[in-house]
Image (tube, rainbow, N blue to C red):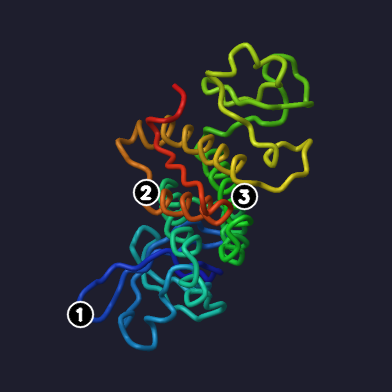
Amino acid sequence: MQWQDQAIILGVKRHGETSVIAEVMTRERGRHLGLVRSGRSRTMQPVLQPGNEVEVTWRARLDEHLGEFRLEPVKLRAARLMETATAVYGVQAMGALLRLLPERDPHPHLFEALEIILDHLHNPADAGELFVRFELAVLNDLGFGLDLTECAATGSRADLAYVSPKSGRAVSRAAGEPWADKMLILPAFLSAQENQAADFESLAAAFRLTGFFLHRHVYEPRGLEASAAREGFVQAALKALNPVQRTLLRPDELPA
């Protein structure tokens, strides 16, 4: 068995004295593991850094085997990803999100999204918006997608201001006002009808929104906690937009 694909390094684990098991996100075959012989060598260590893009060839006798990777560098981002807090935490947080999906399950749109976000993690405002959309895409692929296109109560697509914590559907300002204290805020930059960049308040609301549904539908049922890297990314992105204000977004602070 053999195949070749484009891939992004998510992480590595030591295997024996000189080798590693590499975890990559491939374009066509999803998240995949493989043995890299001499992966701890001086030549391979710089290549096997999270965020780097490689051309990977996988070989194994049977499809269900771990198999062996041969890697050729394509785009080495790792050094630049160490320059800002949003980049350091972001690459780890996205790797943790991808680990929620089954191994070897194709998600080409997530590969493309990951590729784009990795090139924008140095800009906290762009990184925050893109990361939220990545979380929404992962929720959708896990079967818990949110419907933010029209009001759940009226069908209107105008003035969408809230998201129902029960249904995950958008609600217009007029329909949701009587229950506003029990609703999640729908940031304007996530609405198809708006064309606004995220500011501190809207980005914080977006992190609360995705964090709430990830906690309810994914982490809590699996007995998991959100990765520490996500919290680090959230705080770094918000601090960059407003260095004075710092808001911790914990699941116990979110509406029930």
Taking depth in this image into account, of 243 and 60 the one nearest to the observer is: 243
Q: Earlier in the sequence, mark 3 or mark 2?
A: 3
Q: Depth check: give the residue in front, 227 or 253.
A: 253
Residue at the image point whose x is 75% and y is 19% from the top: 155
The residue indicated by pointer 1 is 17
Label 3, residues with CA under 10 Å away: few <14, some 14-19, many ≥20: many
Q: Residue at x 46, y 24 (%)?
A: 255
**Disc 3 marks which residue?**
129
Q: Residue furthest front?
A: 244
Which kind of residue does numbered mark 1 sit on? Glu
Asked whether 57 or 168 is in front, the reply is 168
**Label 2 crowd (10 A; few <14 / some 14-19 / many >=20):** some
Q: Amino acid at mark 2?
A: Ser
Q: Earlier in the sequence, mark 3 or mark 1?
A: 1
Q: Position of residue 90 (x, y in %)?
A: 48, 58
Tell me the amino acid under the disc marked 3: Glu
Asked if 17 appears above or below 191 in the picture, the reply is below
Q: Which of the two discs, 1 and 2, sits closer to the camera?
A: 2
Give how far across and how far down residue 252 sits, in percent.
37, 30
- For the residues labelled 3 and 2, the Cα–Cα distance comes to 19 Å
Closer to us: mark 3 or mark 1? 3
**Image position of 55 (left or right of 198):** left
- As measured in the structure, the alpha-carbon distance from the residue carrying label 1 to the one carrying label 2 is 29 Å
Q: Secondary structure at mark 1?
A: loop
Return the disc, 1 or 2, that comes first in the chain's sequence: 1
The quarter of the rendered structure image containing the N terminus is: bottom left
Question: Which image quarter: residue 137?
Answer: top right
Q: What SS does tag 3 mark?
A: helix
Task: Name the residue beneath numbered marker 2.
Answer: 227
In the picture as drawn, the residue positioned furthest to the top comes out as 178
Give how far across and how far down residue 214 sits, in percent: 45, 37
Q: Are marks 1 and 2 in contact (CB under 8 Å)?
A: no
